Image (cartoon, grey):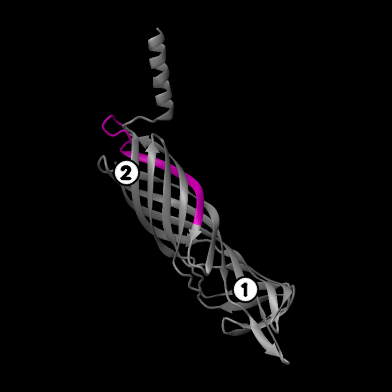
Amino acid sequence: MVKAGVTASLLVIAGLSGATPASAQTFIDVFAGRSMPEDTAATITADEARINGTIVPARLRIDVASLEPTSSTIYGVRIGHWFGRIGLAIDAATLDPDVRRQTIRATGNLRLEEELFGEPVTIDPGRSVSVDIPRVTVPTTGTVAALAMVRLPIGATPARPAGRFATYAFAGPAYLVTDSDLSGNWGLRAGGGVKLALTRTLSLFGEYRYTRIAADAVAGRIGGEAMGVRGSTGDIRIDLNVRNHSAVGGVGLSF
């Protein structure tokens, strides 16, 4: 009776976890697709100024109501391991948050009268103005995410414990990896998809991915000279949240 009770308990635990030696898998997914970013607000700031070589305090802040990024093609790879229905993975993908040519609305806390993007721009404190900007190309960047995953096999058999089909979902922290001009910050990646097993080791999949990451870039300095006094700001920084919706498809290998 004791032996039978232990055996029954083990079967219950295995059934709840869905983790059997046959369903444990290491996998590699390679994918490509299209990224469709949301419009995003941005902030342009400069925290210091130099007057004849002397640093003086400055708190220039320009709020941009909405920037419209461009859509782009993305590529990526995901490597992970399934422990039954629960999995862990490292996911890396490209990200191209370019900004299309457009007219933006901007509001500043200080008077700004300079040439920006090749055009004279005047912003009075508290006044919303229209500013034409050209297409801004950001160097190709990438994101790396650590994902927790869960799957629901459909049509599982002893010969194919992961099922002919499997729906899955994932979520985890993501980090922006880029060049020195665009600083990366932590964000979030989440999504889900469907995988179709062609053989025990080869599969096709399609998924939706959402990525949100904060980023800031150095946009240069503004400077000039008047009546023998030369001045310039410190680094002008642009802060924005990159929010991307992506649809991708790919090929997976399991072993």
In depth, the one of 100 and 172 nearer the eye is 172
| Residue highlighted by disc 1 | 235
Instruction: Decide: few, some or many residues near mark 2? Use Cα within 10 Å; few <14, some 14-19, many ≥20.
Output: some
* Residue occupying the point 25% across, 41% down: 199
Q: Position of residue 181 (x, y in %)?
A: 52, 70
Judge whether 141 appears above or below 203 on screen: below
Read off the magenta span.
Answer: 157-175
**Mark 1: which amino acid?**
Asp
Judge whether 158 appears above or below 52 on screen: above
* Residue occupying the point 41% across, 38% down: 151
**Mark 2: which amino acid?**
Leu
In depth, the one of 180 and 240 nearer the eye is 180
Q: Quadrant of residue 223?
A: bottom right
Q: Position of residue 248 (x, y in %)?
A: 39, 55
State the quadrant of the N terminus.
top left
State the quadrant of the C terminus.
top left
Element carrying mark 2: strand
Sequence-first disc among 1 and 2: 2
